[in-house]
Image (cartoon, rainbow, N blue to C red):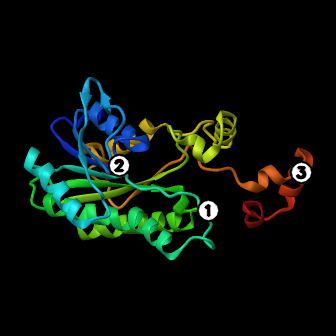
Amino acid sequence: MALEIDLAGRIVLVTGGVRGVGAGISRAFLSAGATVVACARRPAESPVTSDGREIEYLPCDVRDADSVRELVETVVGRHGRLDHVVNNAGGAPFALAAEASKNFHAKIVELNLLAPLLVSQAANAVMQNQPDGGSIVMVSSVSGHRPSPGTAAYGAAKAGIDSLTQSLAVEWAPKVRVNSLIVGLVETEQSELHYGDQDGIAAVAETIPLGRMARPEDIGRCAAFLASPLAAYVSGATLLVHGGGERPAFLAASTAGDGSRVARNNTAGVGEQSR
């Protein structure tokens, strides 16, 4: 097998695939030769293209079961099949858990956990009847694996996505593979809303071991890999896409010099050092 991602002739649905991370995912699949159908509640301000090819846009509210069913039926009616789905649509505004309403929390969980399940159910019903089956990639977040102050319901929903990924991978095998990307900080056109001005964005990027935030295309390439034949034996997996993660907070707070640190490590047990 050639070690390259070739998805020519494949039909891919990317939810929320017209801006931000979603647009990067759509561009990556276009570059790999796939036909990309991207859905969102509203179209992009400018076309999403790559290598002279453009996505097909379909409107859809992925929280609505009827809208999702119509979306998948339209894709299959237009192209005759559905090979891969990337559940990217999601997100949450900042809101402290103690102050947000029950309705707010419910809508965040609905968008970030229940909606991907709805889309996956509709796609699986098609893929199970295809000779080659299909694959589903969930876009999860580091927020589901560490404290997420200000976006607690979002973090909980993303933790749920990774659990859901493992369960669906077992239920829907062997025809359908299901995997997730645990995504870290990504620089998009809306980064200033989360990190402040360019100085703030640069300062946050310096906290990442690889020295920068992800670009949307970084996430897209990983999604394309999981959908491709190169990952034919990968299912129920979570792929970390976070540039090395986050440095432990105690490293910034510590006042110990090199000498005292060496002395302390020489007398500490393994468990104590790891803390």
- Find residue 19 and report its horizontal and vertical position in percent: 39, 41
Which residue is outermost to the bottom? 102
**Residue 178 position (above or below residue 106):** above
Q: CA distance from mark 1 to mark 2?
A: 23 Å
Q: CA distance from mark 3 to mark 2?
A: 45 Å
At x 32% / y 46%, what residue is drawn?
Answer: 42
Does 173 sit above or below residue 196? below
Relative image position of residue 185 (x, y in whole percent)? 55, 46
Relative vertical location of residue 128 with respect to residue 48 in this rendering, above or below: below
Q: Please give the label number shown on residue 16.
A: 2
Label 2 packing within 10 angstroms: few (<14), some (14-19), many (20+): many
Query: Which residue is the site of mark 3?
Result: 255
Give the side of residue 7 with respect to residue 244, left or right: left
Q: Nearer the viewer, mark 3 or mark 2?
A: 2
CB of mark 3 within 8 Å of CB of mark 1? no
Q: Amino acid at mark 3?
A: Thr
Which label sits in the foreground, 3 or 1? 1
The amino acid pointed to by label 1 is Gly
Residue at (11%, 49%) from the top-left corner?
81
Mark 1 or mark 2: name the one nearer the start of the chain. 2
Report helix, strand or loop for mark 1: loop
* Image quadrant in which the C terminus is located: bottom right
Q: Residue at x 85, y 56 (%)?
A: 266
Q: Are marks 3 and 2 in contact (CB under 8 Å)?
A: no
Q: As rendered, which of 265 and 13 lies closer to the eye?
A: 13
Q: Which residue is mark 1?
A: 150
